[in-house]
Image (cartoon, rainbow, N blue to C red):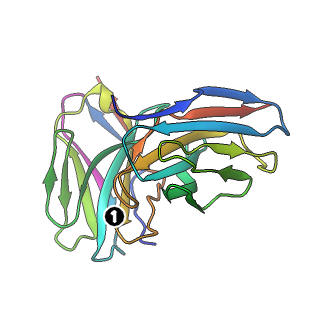
Amino acid sequence: DAKTTQPNSMESNEEEPVHLPCNHSTISGTDYIHWYRQLPSQGPEYVIHGLTSNVNNRMASLAIAEDRKSSTLILHRATLRDAAVYYCILLNNNAGNMLTFGGGTRLMVKP
Amino acid sequence: DGGITQSPKYLFRKEGQNVTLSCEQNLNHDAMYWYRQDPGQGLRLIYYSQIVNDFQKGDIAEGYSVSREKKESFPLTVTSAQKNPTAFYLCASSISHGKKQFFGPGTRLTVL
């Protein structure tokens, strides 16, 4: 299974942009890059996903490197409610592929 | 409102007792999943079901059992064979297998 590597933790100031990196050097051509986040004592929630092109939605932006070996989740203006663990996951739509959650990045937002 | 519900939020059991955790969804999703999360760790897959009356073991199925008799429901039984059952249990569903997953609020099980 293709794996991802993320920093254990990051800090940000409120209302500043946050760039959360993810390395996935063994990604295959059909792997989608998914991001989920988990607030304390809650279930994870889907944030965004992409294949090759950069993606934007109301929650975040996803910047994917040209070689697809890394990606960056961008929160444009961090709020205290964005403090969570962010998981970068590779998902292949072939039958049998699962979301595999690693340790993620714990984002702390300072007021 | 559509969503996934898990009950109860907190559950306490004595060692050696079986316990069943409830998971219900009204999203009309075909696929459902059970994960376990230990403190400070990521999620690990216990069982998943792609369709009614079918389910497969995940990475840590030993000591657990599931059933999928209805599309909306995917209960998980933690049996006495599970060596360390105390954990946070999360249920999820997706429109079909491999698509983005929607998670319930979780059940925190403590075995005394």
**Residue B42 visible within the image:** no
Placement of B82 over or under A91, stated as above or below: above
Placement of A17 over or under B9, stated as above or below: below
State which quadrant residue A59 falls in: top left
Q: Nearer the viewer, residue B68 or A6?
A: B68
Quadrant of the drawing holding the C terminus of chain A: top left
Q: Position of residue B15 (x, y in %)?
A: 84, 36
Q: Is residue B112 left or right of residue B75?
A: right
Q: Is residue B105 left or right of residue A78?
A: right
Q: Residue furthest top?
A: A111
Query: Looking at numbered disc 1 in the image, what kind of residue is underneath it?
Result: Asn
Residue located 81% across and 51% down the image: B81
Q: Residue furthest right?
A: B16
Q: Chain of mark 1?
A: A
Q: Is residue A25 left or right of residue B43?
A: left
Range drawn in magenta: A14-21
Q: Secondary structure at mark 1?
A: strand
State which quadrant residue B74 falls in: top right
Q: How many marks?
A: 1
Q: Position of residue B57 (x, y in %)?
A: 61, 62
Q: Position of residue B62 (x, y in %)?
A: 72, 58
Q: Which residue is mark 1?
A: A23
Q: Position of residue B32 (x, y in %)?
A: 48, 50
> Crowding at label 1, few (<14), some or many (≥20) Cα neighbours within 10 Å?
some
Q: Is residue A108 left or right of residue A18?
A: right
Q: Nearer the viewer, residue A3 or B68?
A: B68
Residue located 37% across and 72% down the image: A94
Residue located 43% across and 47% down the image: B93
